[in-house]
Image (cartoon, rainbow, N blue to C red):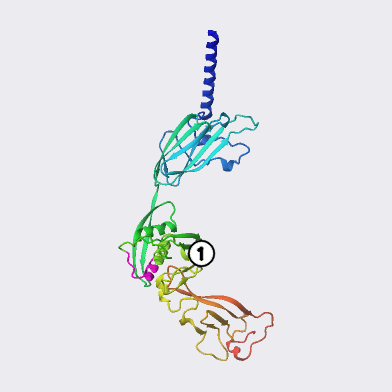
Amino acid sequence: MTVWKAKRKTTMAIAALLLLCAALAACTLSITPKITETPEPSAAKDPVEDEPGDSIKALGWEDVDRLEVGEEALIYLYENPSTGYRWYYEITGNGVVELVSDRYISDPNPKGWDGVGGSRYITIKAVTPGEASIEMICKRADDEIAETRAYPIVVTAGQRSTALLYADYSLGEAGGDIRTQELIYEGELTVEKLAAGLSGWSKLDFSVSAVIDGKAVIVDWLKASALTGGTGGGEPDTGFSFPDGESLSWFMLDSLWRTVYENLGLEVYYTMDGGKTLTLPALSYPASFPADIPYLGSPFYVTHSDAYGDAPEPQYYGGWHASPTVGSGFNTRYRFDPDGSFIYCCSDMDGMDRNRGADGKWSIKPISTANPQNELLCLEISTRIVWEGGIEVESFGPTSQHGNGPV
């Protein structure tokens, strides 16, 4: 009887030991994991989607790892779901880091055996400077914990760069007061970061969203901005004063335009409320800014205030003739009408030009955003008059003064 009891105790001890070993084996076969030892995923998984990149940093157990804002890192641990144990994570640190993905990848199992293990991949991203910790817990569904591991992390701001903010007090006058202040930023410089810098400096709300298209950017003023009727983000800084809504509007338009152009070299197209035409009742001129025309700065609009809108400037109305007099026939000529339409006719003396005329729309536009004072006369042709066919004969009559030739 005594011998039977002894054997029973021995058997129970051996069974307990085996269970303990199985639990530990579920979580601790890889003590010092390295990213270069990542196992190949099973045939059922896409290796491009499931394998972590070689460039991602693997966090060390109990060692303090340092990350920069925006950087991602990986925790890699062996796991065997057939034992009932798996790894769980707990992140502390008030938003310093965030989870990107939590994935399990099985080891290769071409013969389909049961009990094949794999790896648990926890990918995190550094969000803001500070300290954080990730605790990995290996446990079963009944909360029986086999092992825990801690991964302390310190997140730093990383490399910082500087840009220059422009507070543009032109207010419609060329050569107006322009102040500057340095902006320190991290990562890629964007229109939104520049706008946020102007908000912080002036205490006015420059809330915008931006979409870059080549060498241009569409800047959409949000409803919360001080320009389009928002609260403004509080009272303007004591260094910024505006006698009325018009001067405030010009200040915001000019400051963001100049700041974006000087730092990013982009032409600025203004819109509001998700792409609608920017309309500002506070401005006496213009009342709106077409979404397909770049913003040109308040001095340009004030200078052209008498003619701004759909109709071009009065100084360009009328006819244009290539010579001061009219002989036996008209020379090359244009007519520019106040409604923005034009008519072109080639010279009556030129019998060889098959392009006899055209009509369409005309407008005056600056050569570039940087130099809005230099302008171009732009013609948009709707209809052409072209001679087709015919034969060549010797010229006679008035055209012969230019030498005999075919007509």
Q: In the rendered structure, does residue 314 fall within the stretch colored magenta? A: no
Q: Pick whichever, 354 or 263, lies toward us.
A: 263
Q: Describe residue 56's horizontal placement relative to residue 117 as left or right.
A: left
Residue 152 placement (x, y as % from top left): 41, 37
Q: Quadrant of the N terminus?
A: top right
Horizontal side of residue 202 vs 338, given as left or right: left
Q: Return the residue at label 1.
A: 275
| Residue 80 quadrant | top right
Q: Residue at x 54, y 34 (%)?
A: 119
* Label 1 crowd (10 A; few <14 / some 14-19 / many >=20): few
Query: Residue 45 or 162: which is nearer the viewer?
Result: 45
The amino acid marked with disc number 1 is Gly
Residue 64 x %, y %: 40, 37
Looking at this view, is 368 or 91 the one in front? 91
Q: Furthest residue to the left?
A: 238
Element type at mark 1: loop
Residue lying furthest front in this view?
1
Quarter of the image where the C terminus is located: bottom right
**Is 241 one of the magenta-colored residues?**
yes
List x then y, in percent, for residue 275: 51, 64
**Span colored in magenta:** 240-251
Against 208, is 30 above or below? above
Q: Is residue 301 above or below residue 236?
A: below
Please state which of residues 6 and 55 is positioned toward the viewer in this rendering.
6
Q: Position of residue 344 (x, y in %)?
A: 57, 81
In this rendering, the count of numbered labels is: 1
312 horizontally vs 113: left or right: left
Q: Quadrant of residue 235?
A: bottom left
